[in-house]
Image (cartoon, rainbow, N blue to C red):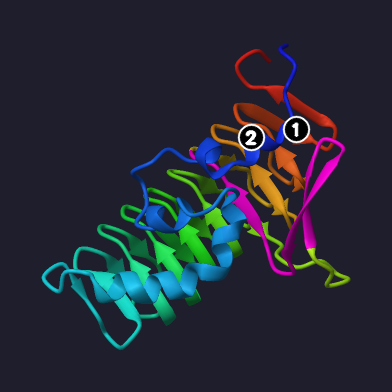
């Protein structure tokens, strides 16, 4: 099994996401680390929404833009500052509180709650998920009941742990960053400041904290292996 590297460079926005899979790319390009974009999501949505083509998007009320090919259940709640992309499905009783930029061909499922998030194209949060103050990369998937925990119990600023190193984010609310093609198993909790590299699998019922490198399998705390050489 190859040694799994833990480096700050692995946390860079450019290392976690391939270009071309989110309307928020212009916002993310301004960051070194992707969590730096969290504070600007709502403002970006307002500016981007105002530029959307009315022939493709409709606005049921100010601050909300929904692509005409998206399917939104009548029972879903849509808050302020929301963009829903093409061919996305928002299912029964979804609770989109606000500040949500949802890409195309995504799934926001039954009783899933979103707040201050960027969901890249193809993201699936299909069953009883909570995703807050988080960014989910292209075609990432959260299994049923998996959630992001976005605030520490003592309410202090959140750090991202990389090996024995800690990077202060200065944020009191920060859930998780998922790179492209991440699979999170059912019933898992992504603790505040979790960053998962692209192409990584998280075992079901995991409690994850800190950085999990790309191309790995998280089995439990202290047991992370290279998925291609396991």
- Residue 139 point in image, percent of width and height: 43, 43
Image: magenta residue range: 158-180
Q: Is residue 100 left or right of residue 71?
A: right
Displayed quadrant of residue 92: bottom left
Where 95 sits versus 3, above or below?
Answer: below
The residue at the point 70 percent across, 68 percent down is 173
Which residue is identified by label 2?
A: 10
- Residue 120 point in image, percent of width and height: 42, 52
Q: Residues within 10 Å of mark 1 (few under 14, many from 20)?
A: some
- Residue 176 point in image, percent of width and height: 64, 54
Which residue is identified by label 1?
A: 219
Q: Residues within 10 Å of mark 2 (few under 14, many from 20)?
A: many
Q: Is residue 161 magenta?
A: yes
The residue at the point 43 percent across, 38 percent down is 18
Where 93 sits versus 118, above or below?
Answer: below
Q: Is residue 94 left or right of residue 156?
A: left
Displayed quadrant of residue 71: bottom left
| Among the two numbered marks 1 and 2 on one chain, the one whose residue lies closer to the N terminus | 2
Please identify the quadrant where the C terminus is shown: top right
Q: Nearer the viewer, mark 1 or mark 2?
A: 2
């Amino acid at each position: 099994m190859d040694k799994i590297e833990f480096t700050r460079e692995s946390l860079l926005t450019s290392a976690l996401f391939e270009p071309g899979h989110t309307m928020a790319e212009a916002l993310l390009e301004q960051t070194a680390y992707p969590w730096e974009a969290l504070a600007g999501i709502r403002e970006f949505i307002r500016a981007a929404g105002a530029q959307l083509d009315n022939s493709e998007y409709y606005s049921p009320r100010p601050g909300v833009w929904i692509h005409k090919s998206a399917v939104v259940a009548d029972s879903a709640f849509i808050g302020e500052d929301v963009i829903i992309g093409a061919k996305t499905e928002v299912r029964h009783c979804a609770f989109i509180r606000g500040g949500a930029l949802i890409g195309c061909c995504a799934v926001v499922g039954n009783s899933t709650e979103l707040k201050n998030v960027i969901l890249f194209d193809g993201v699936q949060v299909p069953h009883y998920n909570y995703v807050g103050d988080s960014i989910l990369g292209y075609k990432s998937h959260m299994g049923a009941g998996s959630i992001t925990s976005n605030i520490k119990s003592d309410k202090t600023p959140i750090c991202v742990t990389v090996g024995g190193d800690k990077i202060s984010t200065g944020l009191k609310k920060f859930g998780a960053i998922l790179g492209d093609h991440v699979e999170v198993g059912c019933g898992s909790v992504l603790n505040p400041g979790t960053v998962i590299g692209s192409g990584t699998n998280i075992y079901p019922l995991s409690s994850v904290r800190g950085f999990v490198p790309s191309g790995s399998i998280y089995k439990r705390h202290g047991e992370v292996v290279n998925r291609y050489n396991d």
